Image (cartoon, rainbow, N blue to C red):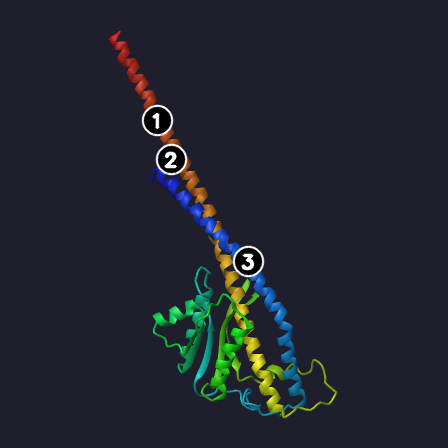
Amino acid sequence: MANAREIKNRIESVQQTRKITNAMYLIASTKLRRARNDLAATRPYFDALRGEIKRVFRRAGDVDSPYFYPPDNNTPLEGTYGCLVITADKGLAGAYNQNVIKEARKLLSQHPDTELYVVGEYGRRFFDQHRIPIQHSFLYTAQNPTLDRAREISALLLDGFDKGRLKEIFVIYTDMESSLLSEAKSTRLLPFHRAHFACLAKEKAVREPFEFYPSVETVLQSVIGSYVSGYIYSALLDSFCSEQNARMTAMDAADRNAEELLGSLKLQYNRVRQAAITQEITEISAGAAAQRAAFGKEG
């Protein structure tokens, strides 16, 4: 059994660790609140873009665009896929990173001819360690998602798609549906299914005639670029929110475990201390009795 000094040192170590987990919990909660505000502030703009694409299909349903599947084709396309994988820069966030990596490996097993575009130091290290090629690694931190970075990512992906090198583009990120539910998702970004927009075309009829200048294809191409940037920005923010929420959950669990461990250690420490006190009293009593016996014999 450990002595009192060893148990006391262990208690101090757990208390120091608990201070760190508490600090990480507070930092994560602050980052989560700020990211949610950013997401809420930008969402109306991209919802409006989605509405404009729906209006285009309501007025020109037979438009031909490379960003959409043909109306009679729903089968996956042959060729090279591009996949944007969004991970965190570090761990200590439960299964957050592992779930994203699992979805990426699932896509690679289904379609080996897939180029990876990675955001986050954790994903870069994982793919390097497992000798999985990375087409492009975005070296900026995943801790600060911005619209400029989303535009940079979308420009690179759209360039490969427009040139015909990438036939389909996927985004693997973590969607935070609520504070209790986050799910790693693999979503095809391009090409769109027309039903993705046309299915909501009945929401509000547009009766005023309007024309597209210079053409409906040009208008779509311009709008789609902004829409893809907005989708990637939303995925970056969603992933960041999910990471902070997962870290809060992990740190809260660590804090509860530390409380239980401290309770157990303090009980153990009190028992060892009480045993030491009892032993000291016993030794003193035995010594006193021996002294009295020796004094009685001398007398």
The local crowd at label 3, few if under 14, some if 14 to 19, many if 20 or more residues have their Cα within 10 Å, is some
Q: Is residue 194 visible?
A: no
Chain-order first, disc 2 or disc 1? 2
Residue type at mark 1 is Glu
Q: Residue 94 appears at what percent x and percent y?
A: 46, 61
Chain-order first, disc 3 or disc 1? 3
| Residue 280 image label | 1
| Structural distance between the alpha carbons of marks 2 and 1 | 12 Å
Q: Nearer the viewer, residue 130 or 182?
A: 130
In this figure, which residue is indicated by the disc labeled 3? 29
Q: From the image, which quarter does the C terminus lie in?
A: top left
Q: Please tell me which residue is depicted at 65% across the width and 87% down the height of the picture.
A: 56
Q: Please tell me which residue is depicted at 40% across the width and 70% down the height of the picture.
A: 124
Residue lying furthest top: 299
Compared with residue 221, is residue 84 higher up or lower down, i.e. above or below? above
Determine the image quadrant of residue 281: top left
